[in-house]
Every structure is written in structure tokens, then in C-alpha cells.
Image (cartoon, rainbow, N blue to C red):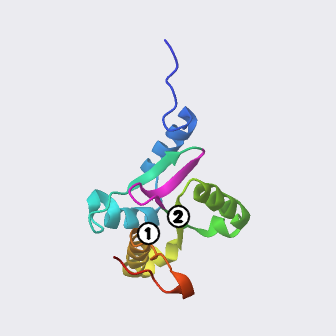
Amino acid sequence: MSESKPVRGVSAELRAAARGLRRDGTPAEAVLWEALRSNRLDGLKFRRQHAVGRFVQDFYCPAHKLVVELDGGIHDQQAERDADRTSALAAHGCRVLRFRNEEVFDDLPNVLNRIRASIESSSNPLPELGEGGEPKRAG
């Protein structure tokens, strides 16, 4: 029997890890997932513990290439690693939003509004500027 080929460049080990993370998510992830799942946030499709390349993102909106990461206390010791990961994802055209677990518990509406704002800003590109820095006029 032949080995299965990786999906989206994801190893079998990383796919298994993503499945485990979905099964054993943190309480903050469970709270945010309830707000994002089944297109509940403005009809947007999010994936949970989504593996791409060498990373598993906590939440991913493929239509807007938006990664949402929740950071617990461990992230205080791995700021450099998180910055490298964000840079690698940005190189692939993804934007990364990071929230502390406490933000999800203490102010979920603000977290959701910040996700909305990020998506709206990506959906409304800046206008082309003409001479003098003024927006170009149509026509």
C-alpha cells in the first residue's frame, strides 16, 4: 500500500497534530469557535486548527487569508518564535491577528469587532492616489 500524499504541503504528522488540537482545544478557543463556527460572524467561513505548510493556525478565514491566533501564557516566552511565524505567514499573503485568551473571556464583542475591522480593511483597498496625494477620480 502506498503512502498518502500531503495535502497543501502538510505532513501526516502535522495533520494528526491539528486533529488533536481540535479535539483538545483550550477554553478560550472553544469560546471563540462558538462565535465563528457555521458562518456565524457575518457569514464568514472560518476553519479551526487549520494546518497549512508547517503551521497549524488556531482559526483561519480562507476568503480573506486571515489567521486568528489566541495566545496564552506560554506565548510570553516565545515572542520571537511567534514573530517569525507571523512573518512566514505574511510572506504567503496572510494577515495575522493575535488576541490574549483573557481578551476572549473578558471582551468577546471587541475581539469580534477587531476581526470584522480587519476583514473590512482587506475588502476595501486604499484608493489610487493621483498627483499631490489626492485620490484619483473615476472617469
Q: Quadrant of the C terminus?
A: bottom left
Residue 95 got which mark? Answer: 2
- Going from the N terminus, do you reach mark 1 or mark 2 first? 2
* Residue found at the far front of this picture: 139
What percent of the width, then of the height, locates residue 18? 49, 45
Which residues fall within the magenta stretch? 54-66
Question: Mark 2 and mark 1 in contact (Cβ < 8 Å)?
Answer: yes
Residue at 38% of width from left, 67% of height from top? 31
SS assignment at label 1 = helix
Question: In the structure shown, which secondary structural element does the residue marked by tag 2 occupy?
Answer: strand
On the picture, is 61 further left or further right than 102? left
Q: Which residue is mark 1?
A: 122
120 vs 63: above or below: below
Residue 75 drawn at (x, y percent): 64, 66
Count the marks.
Answer: 2
Residue 98 appears at what percent x and percent y? 54, 69
Name the spot of residue 134 as percent of width and height, x first.
49, 86
Foreground pick, 120 / 112: 120
- Determine which quarter of the picture holds residue 110: bottom left
